[in-house]
Amino acid sequence: MKKAMTALGLVGLFLALPALADVPAGPALQDFKVINSGDTAWMLTSTALVLFMTIPGLALFYGGMVRKKNVLATLMQSFAITALVTILWAVIGYSLAFTVGNPYIGDLSRLLLNGMDYIQDSKKLSVHPSAGTIPESVFMMFQMTFAIITPALITGAFAERMKFSAMLVFMSLWSILVYAPIAHWVWAPGGWMADKGVLDFAGGTVVHINAGVAGLVCALVLGKRVGFGKEAMPPHNLVLTLIGASMLWVGWFGFNAGSAAASDGRAGMAMVTTQIATAAAALAWMFAEWLTKKKPSVLGIASGAVAGLVAITPASGFVDAHGALIIGLAAGVVCFWGATGLKHMMGYDDSLDAFGVHGVGGILGALLTGVFAVKHIGGADGSLATQALGVGVTVVYCAAITFVLLKIIDLVIGLRVAEEEEREGLDVVLHGERIE
């Protein structure tokens, strides 16, 4: 019966494909902008840099922090999510996130990228309100890399204990029901948060608060790892983690400076503020750890750098060097507390500090954007109250939908591997492979 239903579903999908030709094509081709080759070249480079952040950057960063028996499973999660979200984004995610639609969700005019036309002979492109002087295809690809890394970040919170099948189902639904709507609210023309004046240059709310909060809910719903708090769970290979953090640092220039969607002065300032904030946060975390634990660790300085990258993300195109320095210093200290003191005080098992770094750092950065935004840089005055609105809505919506999705998946197929499987390790249990 199940096979028959699956076959019928595939037949129905096949029959429905011709109807895509009748889907409205989105922005009309009656208005044109001339493509700027410099802007396009920078955005092609930025797109590659952001993809580089997930594979191999985040995969190595997370893979080095888990135990040896779970390294391959952790790397597999980032790689599989890259492939999965690529298809989902092309089929429906981009259309829901970045077409005009209404203030809360886009329409289906870009379903399967329908209507994404490029007129080569005239060197002009079909207008997309957010694409500026680059082809819409490049804009779509750039935003795809953001949609890929966000769910990949979540995996750090439930590392070493979730079923691979459950992870795939959860990330599919989450990308469509959580990521796409919030991206639309903040970044799409007519999105209600954008109209309210919420500032998020490169993903403080859309990426980091979103991923961090979802990660915290995952950690709470799945529960602690077997032996957590009783057995030592040291990182398997901090060399991999430091290499991954370094790749994230370099790739983040595409993440932040690329969000200018042009090769211009704003992109340059976003690159400057990113570097300053990251360095300040790495040092702040290092010294905070040195004072409290008597030794500065490799894991600590790497985590501090990532905390700085996270916190400056929403502000990078709106603040100057002074604001970046303060945001970075604050992120290093506050995220050190979030990844150590808060986690131990509350007793949850956020395995690789997805919430402690991305959730806490994203919230801090989004709020401080409202304090340090400079009008002559970003063209907008910051407002702490407006930023708090954006943070609050993102936290509540993401937490609620994430919780519901996890509970439904747990009822249908189960979320977590069995205790004996967890003890044996996910590499062998889920993938039939191991590192010798």
Image (spheres, rainbow, N blue to C red):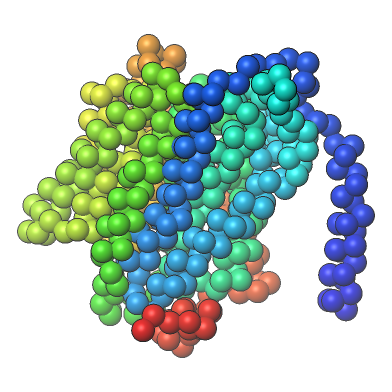
Q: Quadrant of residue 344?
A: bottom left
Please state the horizontal and vertical placement of residue 325, each as a whole percent of the image.
Answer: 22, 30
- Residue at the location (64% across, 67% down)? 409
- Residue at the location (65% across, 16% down)? 33
Q: Is residue 199 left or right of residue 107?
A: left
Please state the horizontal and vertical placement of residue 153, each as a whole percent of the image.
Answer: 45, 54
| Residue 172 drawn above or below residue 279 | below
Q: Is residue 288 left or right of residue 86?
A: left
- Residue at the location (25% across, 24% down)? 321
Quarter of the image containing the C terminus? Answer: bottom left
Q: Is residue 47 left or right of residue 357?
A: right
- Residue at the location (52% across, 43% down)? 146
Residue furthest to the top in view is 376
Please state the horizontal and vertical placement of residue 243, each as a whole percent of the image.
Answer: 30, 57
Q: How many marks?
A: 0
* Near-viewer residue (166 or 230): 166
Quarter of the image containing the N terminus? Answer: bottom right
| Residue 318 drawn above or below residue 151 | above
Q: Quadrant of residue 231?
A: bottom left
